[in-house]
Image (spheres, rainbow, N blue to C red):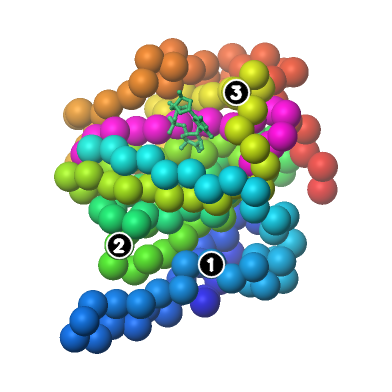
Amino acid sequence: MNVIETRLPGVLIFEPKVFGDARGFFVETFRESVCRERGIPPFVQDNQSRSRRGVLRGLHYQLLQPQGKLVRVASGRVFDVAVDVRRGSPTFGQWAGVILDDVSHRQFYVPPNFAHGFVVLSDTADFVYKCTDYYHPASEAGIVWNDPDVGIEWPAEVLDAVLLSDKDRAAPRLKDQLAEKLPVYAP
Ligand SMILES: Cc1cn([C@H]2C[C@H](O)[C@@H](COP(=O)(O)OP(=O)(O)O[C@H]3O[C@H](C)C(=O)[C@H](O)[C@H]3O)O2)c(=O)[nH]c1=O
């Protein structure tokens, strides 16, 4: 497993070794030791969502029980993004993105207290991920996907047909987020 640092400290790209042969392929998708060695907390919840082209889920985070997420695509192709929403962070409001697909089997680690989202680039995508804490809907918060102050460079190929939930469509900009709804940077 090759682990790559991104421009956001703590946000990591995992590149597993893919073993292809005449039958298909094999890939190790998770090793606890690889995560533990990098200070990633234990995972307690697995999720899966299926979405069609143009669906954009995010940008979400939880204030209580903040979730670190190890995300990957079991089938399809997405552009995945992490945004630093921690008040006082040197990289506050900055983003890092990566293409995740079922060819590279690349994974992305989004630490707790980062907002997370993705947009689907393939006809459909099965998105699977591990979380370091449990779902806590009462403290769910979000930043609107096209916040001009964050300036995420979403792939142009889907921008004319982004499909959002009502919740995500109504999410506030980072600058309009109530201060108490932003986690505090704790180096
Ligand atoms: C996240 C979650 C949702 N749900 C229920 C709540 C709703 O009835 C239904 C759909 O929830 P939602 O529309 O919030 O699902 P997503 O838009 O995929 O949300 C996720 O999308 C972005 C990409 C994330 O990083 C988070 O994991 C999560 O916020 O599943 C649960 O029962 N447990 C859960 O952990």
Does the image show residue 108?
yes
Residue at 27 percent across and 26 percent down: it is 163
Q: Earlier in the sequence, mark 1 or mark 2?
A: 1
30 or 187, nearer to the observer = 30
Please name which of the two marks, 1 or 2, marks the residue nearer to the observer.
1
117 or 24, nearer to the observer = 24
Q: CA distance from mark 2 to mark 3?
A: 30 Å
Q: Which residue is mark 3?
A: 137
Residues rendered magenta in the picture:
53-67
Q: Kindly identify which numbered label has been placed on residue 30.
A: 1
Q: Secondary structure at mark 1?
A: loop
Residue at 21 percent across and 39 percent down: it is 53
In this rendering, the answer to whether 185 lies above or below 79 is above
Q: Find the residue positioned furthest to the bottom.
A: 21
Question: Dot 2: within a 10 Å radius of its alpha carbon, few (fewer than 14), some, or many (20 or more) residues?
Answer: some
Residue at 57 percent across and 60 percent down: it is 12
